[in-house]
Amino acid sequence: MPSKKLTAPVTHVPVPVEFIERKIYLIREQKVMLDFDLAELYQVSTKVLNQAVKRNIDRFPEDFMFQLSKEEADAVGNRSQFVTGSQKHRDPRLRPYAFTEQGVAMLSSVLRSARAVQVNIAIMRAFVKLREMLLSNEDLNRKLSALERKFGEHDENFKVVFAALRKLMSPPDKPRRRIGFKAGGE
């Protein structure tokens, strides 16, 4: 007699890796995702996510999750994406929690839903893609440094080319657009 599967079919969650990558921040020299962004992805409120974490706090040591300091929260708060989704109604006295890659992985065991599993798979892929991009950038940087040592001392034109390449490799400075009322001809 053939056995029947007892699990429900899991539908694919269309969460683009690029969308998730924009929600990964570098805080305290760690790549993290914030509680309100994760809640949006899991389609739960930030309160529900944080309650689930607090019920299972032993699964979230400091290297998996930490609460932002007031200064860190203010710095993140200056980004335009900060006041989106469940963050709009957040008590300003409550600082967001930041989850490292390991903390995000642990969330799927705490939330226990098909959506949480699928979203976590997409998030893990985003973290891996980010890591690969950083490694390829480091490899390119090493190769450029080797070429610079080999040719840079001999010709001034090479120095100009290497400087231009380094500038292209560094992330662009995004000009901040001022928001709010502009009086007169500003």
Image (spheres, rainbow, N blue to C red):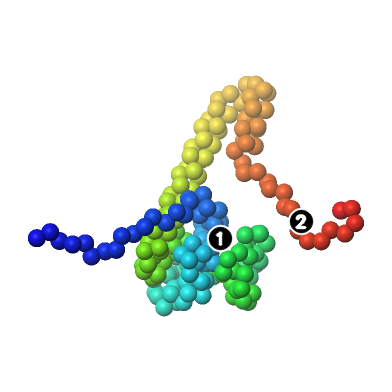
Dividing the picture into quarters, in which one does residue 103 lie?
A: bottom left
Who's the residue at 40% across and 70% down the image? Answer: 111
- 13 sits left or right of 31 in the view: left
Give the CA separation, mark 2 to mark 1.
27 Å
10 Å crowding of disc 2: few (<14), some (14-19), many (20+): few
- 1 sits left or right of 48 in the view: left
Report the front residue among 100 and 92.
92
Q: Residue furthest left?
A: 1
Residue 171 visible at all: yes
Q: Amino acid at mark 1?
A: Arg
Is disc 1 placed on a helix, strand or loop? Answer: loop
Who's the residue at 48% across and 66% down the image? Answer: 43
Q: Which residue is mark 2?
A: 178
Who's the residue at 53% across and 56% down the image? Answer: 24
Position of the N terminus, as image quadrant, is bottom left
Residue 17 lies, in percent from the top left, at 48, 50
Q: Amino acid at mark 2?
A: Arg
Q: Which residue is mark 1?
A: 28
